Image (spheres, rainbow, N blue to C red):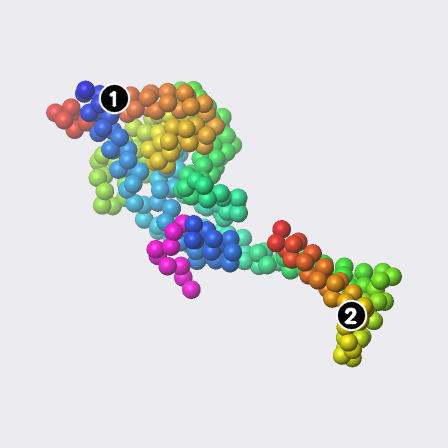
Amino acid sequence: MIENRNDDWLDRQLRDDARAPLEDQGFTNRVMSALPPAAEAWLKPALMLGGTALGGFLATVLAPVGTMVIEGARQLGHFQSFTPAIAMLFAMTAILVVAGYVLAED
Amino acid sequence: MPPAPASSDADLILAVLERDDRRAFAEIVRRHQSQVRTVLRRLTRGDAGLADDLAQETFILAWRNLRHFRFEARFSTWLYRIAFNAWQSDARKRREVLLDTDDDERPLLEVAAPEEGVDSVSRMDLERALATLSDGERAAIGACYYADLSHEEAAQALGLPLGTVKTHILRAKAKLRARLAPPEDKR
């Protein structure tokens, strides 16, 4: 019985001590200034998207299908009707955008 | 726009994850700093400087790993686990930490002066008494009373068998009872 009473007292002491508020005293500012700079948050996706765009450009210029894509861009520039070349241009653009988005999200 | 004071931890975490919202993270730190620093002060035997360094490390690790937080558990429980790991890792660097044995022979550090406006005498006594416990006993008391974890959660957080945690709690309380008699027994 005495042990139970002592236990209650001890439990209360420990829990009161745990709940006693500790003044911040600049601690939060110290933590925030030690966080990695915000630039890192956008740098990685930007590098990935840039890399994907560069890869897409090189693939367009160098790959055999590239001439068709370039032709699609030319036809689109002249407001021609929806040709297979324009469809190919849209498909390539969509693939690059999706790939870049997936990489950036990862 | 600063986060609303009434935002839940989950709202703040989502703001950090979705928008890299540092004000939201600052609010998280403000909310939890007191308890995290207190539990680390008890674990480090009252070394306030070391405890604050470990608390800072805890919040930075939380920031880096926030993406891995699963909303199934309380955020504070997750945070305490990081704090315990930081303490154990630091203590291992300094010396071997034996969480499952007694080690009462170590010298005590000077206990930091208590904060203003609290029951100074009993807090000081409690800090001194807690500092005499072994690492394992102090960790178990820290987990179950200061971090408010269940015995099972404490065992998981500390990497100890459940039975060992229970034994540490029993022994620690027996030692604390012996050092800190209730007020009526002091007469």
Q: Which residue lies most toward the bottom here?
A: A78
Q: Is residue B13 above or below residue B74?
A: below
Q: Is residue A11 visible?
A: yes
**Main SS type for the magenta part?**
loop
Point out the frontmost of discs 2 and 1.
2
For the question of whether residue B47 can be seen, the reply is no
Where is residue B123 drawn, in percent x and y? Answer: 26, 36
Q: Position of residue B76 (x, y in %)?
A: 40, 42
Q: Residue at x 29, y 21 (%)?
A: B174
Identify the residue position indicated by label 1 in the image: B178
**Chain of the residue that carries numbered disc 1 in the rendered image:** B
Residue picked out by circle 2: A86
Q: CA distance from mark 2 to mark 1?
A: 85 Å
Identify which residue, B34 or B179, lies in the foreground. B34
Q: Callout 2, which amino acid?
A: Ile
Residue B124, how many percent across, how many down? 26, 35
> For the residue marked with disc 1, what is the amino acid?
Ala
Which dot marks residue A1?
A: none
Q: Which residue is located at x 16 percent, y 28 percent?
A: B183
| Span colored in magenta | B1-9
